[in-house]
Image (cartoon, helix red, strand yellow):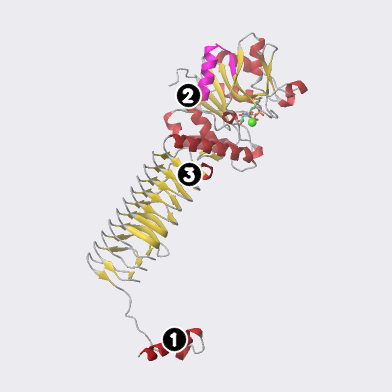
Amino acid sequence: MSQTRPTAVIVLAAGQGTRMKSSLPKVMHPLGGRSLLHHAVSAAAGTAPEHLVVVVRHERERLVSHLDSLPLAAERSLLIADQDEIPGTGRAAECALTRLPEDISGTVVVTYGDVPLLTAETIDGLVEAHESSSNAVTVLSAEVDDPTGYGRIVRDASGALLRIVEQKDANEDERAISEINSGIYAFDADALKKGLASLTTDNVQGEKYLTDVIGFSREAGLPVAASATDDLWQVEGANDRVQLANLGKELNRRQCERFMRAGVSIIDPDTTWIDVDVSIAEDVTILPDTQLLGATDIATGAVVGPSTTLKDTEVGAGAHVVRTHGELAVIGAGADVGPFAYLRPGTRLGESGKIGTFVETKNADIGAGAKVPHLSYVGDAEIGEGTNIGAASVFVNYDGVNKHRTVVGKHARMGSDNMYVAPVTVGDGAYSGASTTVRKDVPAGALAISVAPQRNLEGWVQTNRPGTLAAQAAENASEGERISE
Ligand code: UD1
Ligand code: CA
């Protein structure tokens, strides 16, 4: 789409992120199902730059292996630049340049690894404004209510950009400026190289400031500009867990709005959470208190919720999934799940099948139209199409050392409270009695019964539990019988 393809995008991610107070590196904290860094790198990759560089230092090895694991790392070569012990955003950019061709020209964009809502479209817009004005530097700025902590955009009387001053280096007048530096820039490659070469650490923080490239370029007579965005969320960084939660809420609000505009009914967007890699078709209804996570995919006409969490789960067209927790499961078209079902990885429910109330499944292939309606555990099993599993049945898959599989054929009618002691096979069309413990294979069409005939010891309660309410009730019942005789 973009005609303004930057030569390079540099994502800065070398900082420590101490305010997160976490053993997890800041940029690896999750938001909407992706790490902050994944969001930043996706936006950068979305502008289709010739080169994409991530600058790392703190927790370098974890970041690099995380970057290697990202899906986009495969389709585009991602360069890693190591920042040395010299601190500052300017030094970070210098280190990035060492990974790029020496004669690099065109536009070089700089973004941050901890600014997750920035989109490729916004970067494209910045690059377009930058190139159409033939600027040396264009910085994305924002007008904010509380500019504390940010670099301030200093303009001259005519409104032209002069320089950026950091909070800690600013005087009182400068601190009163409410236009801030987002930290996202488009640079002409030449101006960036010259500006970086001029940087010193002569400031309150003793850092090489990338922001000083702007003042330097301006003094050199080159055109510089600040382009203000009115979408403040897109330039907001996640420095602590409060900001992280606020950003997460806003990202989710945007997700819900996007899906509603695309034809999904979301009854309560405030209690519905949808990760960025989820897909939902038109005419799906999402009921309150539902979380759709990972790569969950919901086909048209399905109704999901209330109070349902699905991760990496496929829901077929027209299926109903109520009060369910599912992960890595596949639910067929028109199937019914829940309320109160727990679908663990490897669950596959066929078209129009049913996994009912208080049922847990794992590595279970349940055929089309087959039903496990009540109070059961189905682990390591295959259940054929049209088969009914009676209430309160357990697929006994674990012998204390190994897991074994149970296979039940098609159109079987299995009794309630059955134990399937794996490995065991039940043939097509078989039946079983209530409380059968299936230890041996059942041939097709057979009725399996494993319980001894029932015996009633008459008068046992009155003799053995005299004086109890049960004995009294039994006594009354037998008197009633005598009278009615
Ligand atoms: C910087 C800007 C400031 C701007 C603010 C926006 C400078 C000198 N200041 O502030 O004008 O308002 O961002 O958030 O640039 N990083 C590195 N290496 C470093 C230092 C930082 O890679 O040596 C990375 C961090 O990982 C982070 C980003 O740069 O992703 C910003 O760092 P941070 O310390 O939060 O910003 P400031 O320098 O305070
Ligand atoms: Ca910051």
Kind of residue indicated by mark 3: Ile
- Picture quarter with ligand 1: top right
Kind of residue indicated by mark 2: Thr
Locate residue 427, reporting x and y percent.
25, 63
Locate residue 433, reporting x and y percent.
30, 71
Q: Please determine whether, in this image, residue 46 is positioned above or below residue 279.
A: above
Label 1 packing within 10 angstroms: few (<14), some (14-19), many (20+): some
Q: CA distance from mark 2 to mark 3?
A: 35 Å
Observer-nearest residue: 263 or 176? 263
Q: Find residue 248 and report its image quarter.
A: top right
Observer-nearest residue: 58 or 440? 440
Label 3 packing within 10 angstroms: few (<14), some (14-19), many (20+): some
Q: Does dot 2 land on a helix, a strand or a loop?
A: loop
Label 2 packing within 10 angstroms: few (<14), some (14-19), many (20+): many
Q: Earlier in the sequence, mark 2 or mark 1?
A: 2
Q: Residue furthest right?
A: 172
**Which residue sits at x=49%, y=36%?**
257
Asked if one can make out residue 25 in the rendered structure from this viewpoint, the answer is no
Q: Residue furthest left?
A: 445
Residue carrying label 3: 267
Q: Which mark is residue 47?
A: 2
Left or right of 329 in this view: 118: right
Observer-nearest residue: 133 or 16? 133
Q: Earlier in the sequence, mark 2 or mark 3?
A: 2
The N terminus sits in image quarter:
top left
Residue carrying label 1: 474
Q: CA distance from mark 2 to mark 1?
A: 83 Å
Locate residue 320, reporting x and y percent.
39, 50
Q: How many marks?
A: 3
Q: Please determine whether, in this image, residue 289 is positioned above or below residue 170.
A: below
Kind of residue indicated by mark 1: Ala
